[in-house]
Amino acid sequence: MRISLISTTLHLFVLVSCLPEASAWDALNDACEWLGNVYNSYFVPKQSECQRLTLQECSCFEVLQTNSFRVKGQPVNAGDLKKGYRLAAKFYHTDKGGKNEDFYFVDACYSLFKEDAVNIEAYQVHLQKLEKRKHVEQWGEDKFRDRIDQLNEMMLTGALPKVIKTRTPPPGMDDPQIDRLFLVLDNSGSMFGGALEIGKEEVSLIEDRVERTPTEVHFIGSPSNVKFRFEDNPSVDDILAEWNAQGGGTQLWEYVFNVLLGNKRPPGAEIDEVVIITDGWDNGSKGAFSGIEGFNEMMTQLIANGIRLRISVLCIGNEDMCKVSQYRDLARSTGGTYSSIDTADEEPVRKERLRGFARHITASNAKRAQLDLEAKAEYEQDLIAGTATELTWYPGLKKLIADAAESGAHETNQAGKKAETEGVQKGSRLDTIMI
């Protein structure tokens, strides 16, 4: 099987993490230099210029953009590879409307970088043979590809037989959906200390989602501000380095409303997802946006403007601040999830709640859609039972309450008829006995 430039570049860069000796680094550096020179006129500078329909015909060198992160004379390191993978995964991920086969090709590229069963000496032998030939620029692209494919075949079926490993697409990933994530982090002074550390632990747990989904990061304070925009492609390390809990107060709901209202969704994006990590209530917004119920004003106005969103809330704090039904019902009614963690919780309890929250956030598109329906159904059941907050902006609330009332009246009537019937039957039996 011929795999374009996959194995050529991958077998080179695999050595970064598994063979740190000087000779391996020198050989890798030389190989990078050679590839950079011979492929100068054919290198694709951006993922968007490598057409998705023919992505598998591109090399992993192009897909992961390793050359663009390399300073001349220096080998590519593990951090460069991770950065290239993160950018490519974001561009081709199904969360952004990409195709499954494209994303898993990118994933296969990165997986091969991490293989450790690589014989650098065998690679060098093949590389030296190619270096003795004429410069690739004189061959033209087709012949260049032929030479690279020859090298791949020698590496894959000759000296180094290899099997390219790919992940099987998880169930429910067949329907791509454009997705955006708004990560809203409480940067107020009250978060400083244990709450901030717990929040950072959660962000680390949802790294997979942040890495694959276009993410915009906002810090809540007084005032609140955007820290990373979608085009910044922030890594989790970037986010954690900036999050310091030195933002003063907490201007939350009014700020989030303005952010979502001003962020036009791209074509094909049906819903925006908001993940909020906070330690308490809004004390910085004005008017109806302030306080624990400020989200009601936000949701009312967003729905009036045709904006659909799913909100998940992780509240870090004590009983008074976090264990309130309002936050829970806000999350469930929008299809999100809610969790509260007390800084005094035992470590096993804390970790389990953090992992549970992360499992929801990092789930696939299809799984999150399923969880969305389950959360709303749970909210409606509790609403009918009278144990959930009646959120006036919730779609179909009036009908739901009316149906519940009608059902309750029907059940009351049925109970009355049953009691009446039982009374008649009991009386009949008594009459019979008396006779």
Image: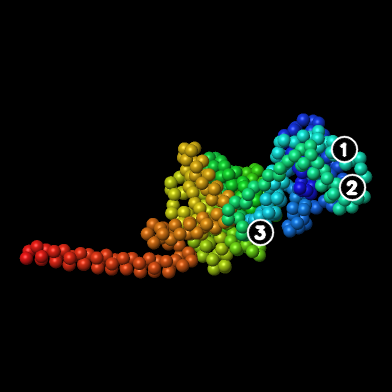
In this orientation, does residue 274 appear?
no
Q: Position of residue 358 (x, y in %)?
A: 55, 47
> Which residue lies at the image location 47% right of the left edge and 59% below the top edge?
376
Which element carries disc 2, helix, strand or loop? helix
At x 46% / y 67%, what residue is drawn? 396
Specify which label sits upstream in the sequence, 2 or 1.
1
Residue, disc 3: 97
| Secondary element type, mark 1 | helix
Above or below, 93 against 153 in this view is below
Q: Amino acid at mark 2?
A: Val
Q: Is residue 397 visible?
A: yes
Q: CA distance from mark 2 to mark 3?
A: 36 Å
- In the picture of the structure, the residue carrying the numbered disc 1 is 128
Q: Amino acid at mark 3?
A: Gly
Residue type marked 1:
Gln
Gap in Å between the C-alphas at discs 2 and 1?
A: 14 Å
Which secondary structure lies at badge 3? loop
Mark 2 or 3, which is nearer the eye?
2
**Label 1, residues with CA under 10 Å away: few <14, some 14-19, many ≥20:** few
Q: Which residue is mark 2?
A: 136
